[in-house]
Image (cartoon, helix red, strand yellow):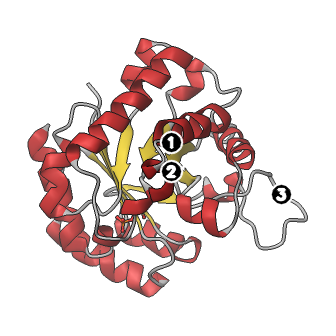
């Protein structure tokens, strides 16, 4: 059975010192052992402090990567550099797709680069409000999956997590209803069956992201095709993140 992955995305928040304070509180509040897997993705500058302060309690991830090993790429961070700190890396977050105009082809390059360094990509997909209203949500997601996962083998899919993040629900306080989220997650699962096979589809974790918090976590995580969450705002405070972990644990 798939276990939940409860992943916090801190976005551009928290200094190294603030990360230390978060983990001091988290380590005091969180149960010593959890059934679900918990993950925090701090900013690059807080990774070292997070690694030290976290004391191996939960997994660490990064929020982005540049798909080259080294060289003349001023300001960028390579998979090899990240592999000193993290196991997971978020790619294709809608904020990067929108603000930084990242294309599916570029995101695909990042996924290949991460896999070649044994890092686990979390591929974000999701539609805007206009695309949903125009009835194009499934087309947009299918295109993001097809192009984002181009030339990825069945074996490589074992290391990949997909996050469905409807853009209209990110940081807006508006959450997809459990029924809407489940419908899209089932669509993604079927897409994986068609493009890989059933055993690949059954093994891939599909996270929901978009204003997930303790008050809606139970209803969302109870859906059969929701295997965890990618959580922005509610991961910034140790208490609310621990509450979500405990809700997930009770469902397992
Ligand atoms: C996110 O950061 O990917 C996210 C879903 O943010 P929020 O939970 O704040 O909507």
Q: Quadrant of ligand 1?
A: bottom left
Return the residue at label 3.
70
* Residue occupying the point 43% across, 70% down: 10
Mark 3 beta carbon near ligand 1 (under 8 Å): no
Specify the quadrant of the image occupied by residue 35: top left
Return the disc, 2 or 1, that comes first in the chain's sequence.
Answer: 2
Return the disc, 3 or 1, that comes first in the chain's sequence.
Answer: 3
Q: Nearer the viewer, residue 13 or 93?
A: 93
Specify the quadrant of the image occupied by residue 77: bottom right
Residue 172 appears left or right of 30: right
Q: Secondary structure at mark 2?
A: helix
* Residue occupying the point 35% across, 59% down: 210
Residue 113 appears left or right of 175: right
Above or below residue 149? Residue 240 is below
Say which mark, if any, is on residue 131.
2
Inter-mark Cα distance, 3 to 2? 37 Å
Q: Is residue 195 visible?
A: yes
Q: Secondary structure at mark 1?
A: loop
Q: Quadrant of the C terminus?
A: top left
Say which mark, if any, is on residue 136.
1
Inter-mark Cα distance, 2 to 1? 5 Å
Locate residue 147, reporting x and y percent. 67, 36
Above or below residue 155? Residue 86 is below
Q: Are marks 2 and 1 in contact (CB under 8 Å)?
A: yes
Locate residue 62, reporting x and y percent. 54, 60
């Amino acid at each position: 059975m798939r276990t939940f992955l409860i992943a916090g995305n801190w976005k551009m928040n928290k200094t190294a010192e603030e990360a230390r304070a978060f983990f001091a509180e988290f380590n005091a509040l969180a149960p010593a052992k959890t059934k679900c897997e918990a993950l925090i993705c701090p900013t690059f500058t807080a990774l070292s402090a997070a690694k030290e302060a976290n004391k191996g309690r939960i997994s660490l991830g990064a929020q982005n990567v540049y798909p080259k090993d080294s060289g003349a790429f001023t300001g960028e961070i390579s998979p090899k550099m990240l592999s000193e700190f993290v196991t997971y890396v978020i790619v294709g977050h809608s904020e990067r797709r929108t603000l930084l105009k990242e294309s599916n082809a570029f995101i695909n390059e990042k996924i290949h680069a991460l896999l070649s360094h044994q890092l686990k990509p979390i591929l974000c997909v999701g539609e805007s409000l206009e695309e949903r209203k125009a009835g194009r949500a499934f087309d947009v997601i299918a295109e993001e999956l097809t192009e984002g996962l181009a030339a990825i083998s069945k074996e490589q899919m074992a290391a990949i997590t997909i996050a469905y993040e409807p853009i209209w629900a990110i940081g807006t306080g508006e959450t997809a209803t459990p029924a809407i989220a489940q419908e899209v997650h089932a669509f993604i699962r079927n897409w994986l069956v068609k493009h890989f096979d059933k055993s690949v589809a059954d093994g891939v974790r599909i996270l929901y992201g978009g204003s997930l918090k303790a008050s809606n976590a139970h209803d969302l995580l109870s859906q059969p095709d929701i295997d965890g969450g990618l959580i922005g705002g509610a991961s910034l405070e140790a208490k609310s993140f621990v509450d979500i972990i405990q809700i997930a644990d009770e469902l397992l």
